[in-house]
Image: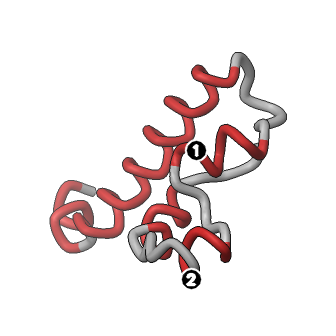
Amino acid sequence: MFQKFLEYKLTYGIIFLNVLVYLIVALANGGIMDMDIRLLVDKGALFGPYVFLQGEWWRLFTAMFLHGGM
């Protein structure tokens, strides 16, 4: 098992980051089932006008860590 972890540590790291960010945003929202869309956009969700009109290209990366619900 530990050998597989070492082989796929980047994958497990991304999974860990996804779960961690989800829990942080869920706690900020007060619940884990339904996320407020404004909160997600404030935390870095992909929103076209911010990316293309305001140059917030980092949202292309951060969006993969945000989820609207379970």
Q: Nearer the viewer, residue 53 or 16?
A: 53
In percent of width and height, residue 57 lies at 42, 76
Judging from the image, what secondary structure is the residue with disc 1 in? Answer: helix
Give the residue displayed 53% in from the left and 45% down from the top: 43
**Closest to the observer, 65 or 36:** 36
Is 28 placed above or below 52 here?
Answer: above
Residue 26: quadrant of the picture:
top right
Up the image or down, 57 lies above or below 13; here it is: below
Residue displayed at 66% across by 73% down: 49
Q: In percent of the image, x 68 and y 24: which residue is there?
A: 29
In this view, 7 is above or below 32: below
Report the quarter where the N terminus lies.
bottom left
In depth, the one of 10 and 23 nearer the eye is 23
Tell which circle, 2 or 1, labels the residue nearer the N-terminal end.
1
- The residue singled out by tag 1 in the image is 42
Instruction: Indicate how the structure is coloured in the image.
Output: secondary structure
Quarter where residue 56 is shown: bottom left
Q: Which residue is mark 2?
A: 52
Categorize mark 1 by other alpha carbons within 10 Å: few (<14), some (14-19), many (20+).
few
Q: Residue at x 66, y 67 (%)?
A: 47
Quadrant containing the C terminus in the rendered view: top right
Give amino acid for label 1.
Asp
Q: Position of residue 59 (x, y in %)?
A: 48, 67
**Kind of residue sitting beneath label 2:** Phe
The local crowd at label 2, few if under 14, some if 14 to 19, many if 20 or more residues have their Cα within 10 Å, is few
| Residue 9 image-quadrant placement | bottom left
Q: Between marks 2 and 1, how big is the CA–CA gap? A: 16 Å
Vertical position of residue 35 compared to residue 4: above or below: above
Q: Secondary structure at mark 2?
A: helix
In the rendered image, residue 30, in percent from the top left (x then y), is placed at 70, 16
Residue 4 appears left or right of 64: left
Q: Residue furthest front?
A: 53
